[in-house]
Image: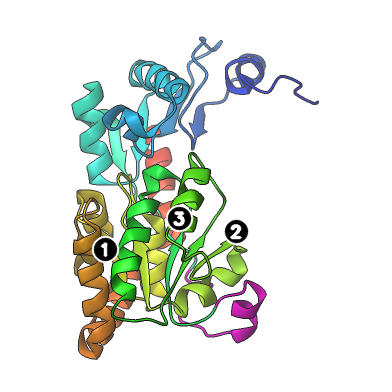
Amino acid sequence: MSWPPKYLWTQIRLWRDLWLNPPDLLFVPAHTIPFLPIRKKTRVVVTVHDVGFKRLPRLYKKIQVIYHDWTMRKIRRRADLILTISEFSKREIINLYKADPEKIRVVYLGYDQKKYFFQEDEAVLKKYGLEKPYLLYVGRLEIKKNILNIFRSFILAKKHFPELKLVLAGSGGDMFEKIKEVINTNKVDTEVILPGYIEEKDLPAVISSAEVFLFPTLYEGFGLPIIQALACQTPVLTSDLDPHREVGGDAAVYADPSSPQAMAQEIIQIMSNVKIKEELKEKGLIQARRFSWEKTAKEIWEIFSFMLK
């Protein structure tokens, strides 16, 4: 059966099906659940990845802030259990929404260990028009991902490494035109490569060939790309924020995301010091092995089994 309206599938269509055929447990791995009552008692588990819209509303559209804030208030009352992806996100949910700590469980995300490992493939680089040496960012190209400061740190690092390029891989997001305008104004558009979306099967080769993987975002619940880069033995420079330290441990390099100078300094040090680079690669492999989708699935299944006893 098709669903013509663009919105409210969860609140109308899913709720209707739950009313007609109520399950013992409903798991919604996203930031919304049906709020109308169901015919029989159904345990509801929902995943809340982060509450960045509440902490940093200036980085989101107003309608996004209003909608997500409304759903979080409903979730706090309606859900039997909230799964979240880091201890940092758990603290944020408790502090910003006064949620019951006993109703929140942390389950880390994972990565595909069979896909993400060091691999070189010149054909993949050629496919996306990439030339080494390059710095790499992967994700949405938008202001809240700190793209402008990534660009500014690249300009500073390039003074020490004239051949260096910057690869910003991903689809355009909020204020993408502003980002392109800044790049063009600095007359380095040929040094900044925008390959667009990179197929997941090609990502490990693209990450493995980078000098440094950049992920200095302003707010995250977890930071999955950090793990993927560590698994590919690529040095990671990320924000000096609690969730990033929780994920990267001692295997990543941290800098103030508001300071292009601090970020550039770390990039220069990594690229200039072979010993530091090799140590980061070794530590990265060890840290990445702490995470897997198998471990994630096992922990969630154990939670469900306990709830259904």
Amino acid of disc 1: Gly
Residue 131 visible in this rendered orientation of the protein: yes
Residue assigned mark 1: 248
How many numbered callouts?
3
Label 2, label 3: how far apart the Cα atoms are:
20 Å
Three-letter code for the amino acid on which mark 2 is drawn: Gly
The foreground one among 270 and 25 is: 270
Mark 2 vs 3, N-terminal side:
3
Name the residue at 42% across, 24% down: 68
Q: Where is residue 255 in the image (x, y as percent from the top left)?
A: 20, 60
Question: What SS does tag 3 mark?
Answer: helix
Residue holding disc 3:
185
Q: Nearer the viewer, mark 3 or mark 1?
A: 3
Circle 2 or circle 1, nearest the eye: 2
Q: What stretch is highlighted in magenta?
A: 113-130
Q: Which of the two discs, 3 and 1, labels the residue nearer the N terminus?
A: 3
In the rendered structure, the answer to whether residue 25 lies left or right of residue 74 reads right
Q: Which dot marks residue 196?
A: 2
